[in-house]
């Protein structure tokens, strides 16, 4: 007998109802514990927050499910037992996906008709998004964390709140680094699903078989290596927003399965005939031309129609006029504060260069350049020699480029892994490449190694060679 | 078959600690044959909770396998990069976890607690 089949509620409604059915639709995590604080029942929101399946964790101490920092200080349920009433605290958890999330927890003792304590009810609420909203710099120009003053961005800011309030599927297009991820988050935070999960899936990162399991989940034994049940990401997005980035990289078979889910709103884990309802709002993003991919039979037209109910196109930064200066000043201020340095300014040549550089990597590239320069510059004024070496290597800084045709100059071939016979400059270039990649990977060496196409030990050896290992 | 390796288990009383970053006590177990030593368990009490200090301890003790509860991705990746096998989200008595890992039968996410019988509610 599984947890779903017990917890019958009689006499409340005209016919009996199972307790899980009652609490599964609530957007807040609920756990029912026995007097020894072992798990009796979790609702779906608690499963999504913790990353654990209720069947798998039935009967174990609750501190192994939510894994809060409160548990090891003083158990919340124990506090509720002593106070004989509700106790609420804020803390953090580490969920099944190894993410630390800020939460608000409440524990309440439960008593039978005779006044005997029979267990506890615990609620858990993800307050991470609320904390991020209150901690954000709120620029006077922009929406959420998106900054801009140009006409094209103003138009975007006008329509985002409107479409956020609908539940329509959205397709966000734009070059790499234009802010598609940030836009999706802002839409979620402006929507009625703010209190629900925001689940991001990069469709280009995993092989097809692993991606299917990641999206839809699997039952234990569904394939070699499936040692336990896994809740797929689609199910964890229930009552929230599902953000599919790099949707153009999804394989055709998975496009079919995704389309079926979007129509039925039912998730069938691999190896299971039992489906689960998942009510989600879908936002997809791509830098590819999906219409062209449809013509080339690489993307399903019916899926494109399904995703393209609302289309948002983010312009490249070189088409955003004065926004480059606005973003530059914002990033200078942000990184100066983050690195606890005196606020930086720019020499006129450096500012002119950065205002006129076309940024093939768009906002992300501008952000990386500013972060690097702020970190490297020992004084309060950033000059040309504090900018990343790849900008000077291709002669961009000295010779400029032609903005009239709108084409960005080629990035140095080191980013394509081809070694150049640049004599004494190669070591400096390689060192800079490692620094740039580590910044982009947020210090994750495994990710940086993968990005560079190197093994981890190769990266470690080169970092040691250039004195970068600490 | 017993696998020869050095194992660190984060402790919370008699169980695996639910959180790696909040650990203040660890058990280090050296299995027979390693460096010619006999089977040995030692418990180390940490001065304070510190993920960085704990990672440093793991590396300085040349631990092969870490058994723990929840751990953040950053530290999981770091230890993995340092060739330490991390079996995380393990829940249950540490002795049971140690026996299983020695026998090569412990996986990440293993739940080793005894569970009570479920009552049937009609």
Image (cartoon, rainbow, N blue to C red):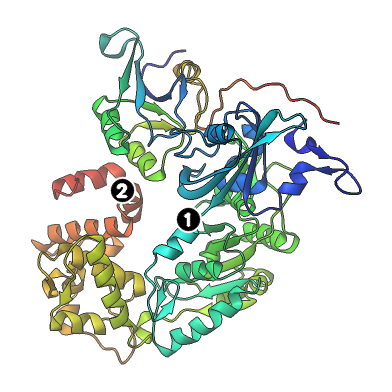
Q: Is residue A10 left or right of residue A437?
A: right
Residue for point 41% across, 42% down: B72
Measured along the vertical axis of the image, is residue A93 above or below residue A34? below
Most extreme residue toward the left, as rendered? A424
Res A413 visible: no
Q: Are marks 2 and 1 on the same chain?
A: yes
Q: Residue at x 43, y 61 (%)?
A: A132
Locate the N terminus of chain A by quadrant: top right
Quadrant in which residue A144 is drawn: bottom left
Q: Which type of secondary structure does the marked residue at label 2 adopt?
A: helix
**Looking at the image, how many numbered discs can be counted on the residues?**
2
- Crowding at label 2, few (<14), some or many (≥20) Cα neighbours within 10 Å? many
Q: Which mark is residue A445?
A: 2
Residue B24: x, y in percent? 35, 28
In the picture, measured across the screen, residue A21 lies left or right of residue B69, that is right
How many other residues sit within 10 Å of disc 1, few (<14), some (14-19) or many (≥20)? some
Please give the chain letter of the residue carrying mark 1.
Answer: A
Residue at point 39%, 66% (across, down): A136
Residue A88 drawn at (x, y percent): 53, 45
Residue A179 image offset from top left, x and y in percent: 43, 72
Q: Residue furthest top?
A: B38
For residue A242, above or below residue A15:
below
Task: List the residue tagged with mark 1.
Answer: A128
> Is residue A438 something that shows in the picture?
yes
When the figure is inspected, residue B59 is found, relative to residue B102, above or below; the finding is: below
On the image, the x and y values in percent for residue A231 come to 62, 45
Q: In terms of image quadrants, where is residue B13? A: top left
**Image quadrant containing the C terminus of chain A:** top left
Q: Chain of mark 2?
A: A
Which of these two is toward me, A60 or A309?
A60
Left or right for A123, reference A16: left
State how far apart marks 2 and 1 are (Cα).
Answer: 26 Å
């Amino acid at each position: 007998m599984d947890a779903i089949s017990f917890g019958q509620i009689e006499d409340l409604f005209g016919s009996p109802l199972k307790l899980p059915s009652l609490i599964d639709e609530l957007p807040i995590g609920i756990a029912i514990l026995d007097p020894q604080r072992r798990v009796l029942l979790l609702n779906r929101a608690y499963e999504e927050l913790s990353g654990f399946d209720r069947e798998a964790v039935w009967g174990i101490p609750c501190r192994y499910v939510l894994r809060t920092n409160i548990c090891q200080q003083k158990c919340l349920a124990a506090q509720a037992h002593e106070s004989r009433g509700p106790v609420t605290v804020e803390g953090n958890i580490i969920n099944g996906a190894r993410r630390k999330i800020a939460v608000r927890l409440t524990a309440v003792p439960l008593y039978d008709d005779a006044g005997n304590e029979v267990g506890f009810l615990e609620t858990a609420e993800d307050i991470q998004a609320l904390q991020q909203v209150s901690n954000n710099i709120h620029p006077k120009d922009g929406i959420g964390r998106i900054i801009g003053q140009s006409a094209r961005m103003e138009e975007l800011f006008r329509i985002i709140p409107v479409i956020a309030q609908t539940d329509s599927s959205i397709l966000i297009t734009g070059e790499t680094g234009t802010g598609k991820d940030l836009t999706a988050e802002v839409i979620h935070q402006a929507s009625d699903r703010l209190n629900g999960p925001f689940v991001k899936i990069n469709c280009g990162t995993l092989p097809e078989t692993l991606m299917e399991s990641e999206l839809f989940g699997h039952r234990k034994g569904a394939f070699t290596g499936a040692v336990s049940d896994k809740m797929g990401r689609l199910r964890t997005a229930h009552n929230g927003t599902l953000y599919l980035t790099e949707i153009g990289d999804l394989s055709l078979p998975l496009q079919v399965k995704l389309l079926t889910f979007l129509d039925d709103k039912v998730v069938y884990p691999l190896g299971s005939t039992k489906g689960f309802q998942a009510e989600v709002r879908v936002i997809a993003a791509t830098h590819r031309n999906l219409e062209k991919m449809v013509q080339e039979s690489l993307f399903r037209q019916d899926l494109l129609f399904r995703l393209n109910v609302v289309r948002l196109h983010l312009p490249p930064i070189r088409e955003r006029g004065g926004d480059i200066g606005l973003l530059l000043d914002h990033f200078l201020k942000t990184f100066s504060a983050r690195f606890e340095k005196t606020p930086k300014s720019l020499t006129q040549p450096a500012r002119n260069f950065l205002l006129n550089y076309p940024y093939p990597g768009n906002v992300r590239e501008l952000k990386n350049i500013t972060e690097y320069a702020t970190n490297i510059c020992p004084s309060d004024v950033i000059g040309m020699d504090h900018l990343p070496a790849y900008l000077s290597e291709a002669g961009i800084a000295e010779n400029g480029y032609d903005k009239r045709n709108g084409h960005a100059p080629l990035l140095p071939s080191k980013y394509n892994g081809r070694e150049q016979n640049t004599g004494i400059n190669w070591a400096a270039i390689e060192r800079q490449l490692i620094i740039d990649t580590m910044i982009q990977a947020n210090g994750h060496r495994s990710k940086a190694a993968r990005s560079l196409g190197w093994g981890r030990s190769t990266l470690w050896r080169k970092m040691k060679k250039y004195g970068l290992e600490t | 078959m017993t696998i020869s390796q050095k194992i660190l288990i984060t402790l919370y009383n008699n169980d695996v600690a639910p959180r790696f970053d909040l650990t203040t006590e660890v058990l280090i177990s050296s299995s027979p044959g390693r460096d010619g030593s006999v089977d040995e368990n030692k418990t180390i009490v940490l001065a304070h909770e510190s993920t960085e200090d704990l990672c440093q301890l793991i590396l300085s003790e040349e631990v092969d396998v870490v058994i723990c509860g929840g751990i953040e991705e950053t530290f999981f990746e770091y230890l993995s990069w340092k060739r330490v096998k991390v079996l995380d989200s393990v829940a249950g008595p540490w002795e049971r976890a140690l026996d299983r890992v020695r026998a090569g039968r412990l996986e990440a996410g293993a739940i080793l607690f005894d569970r009570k019988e479920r009552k049937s509610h009609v």
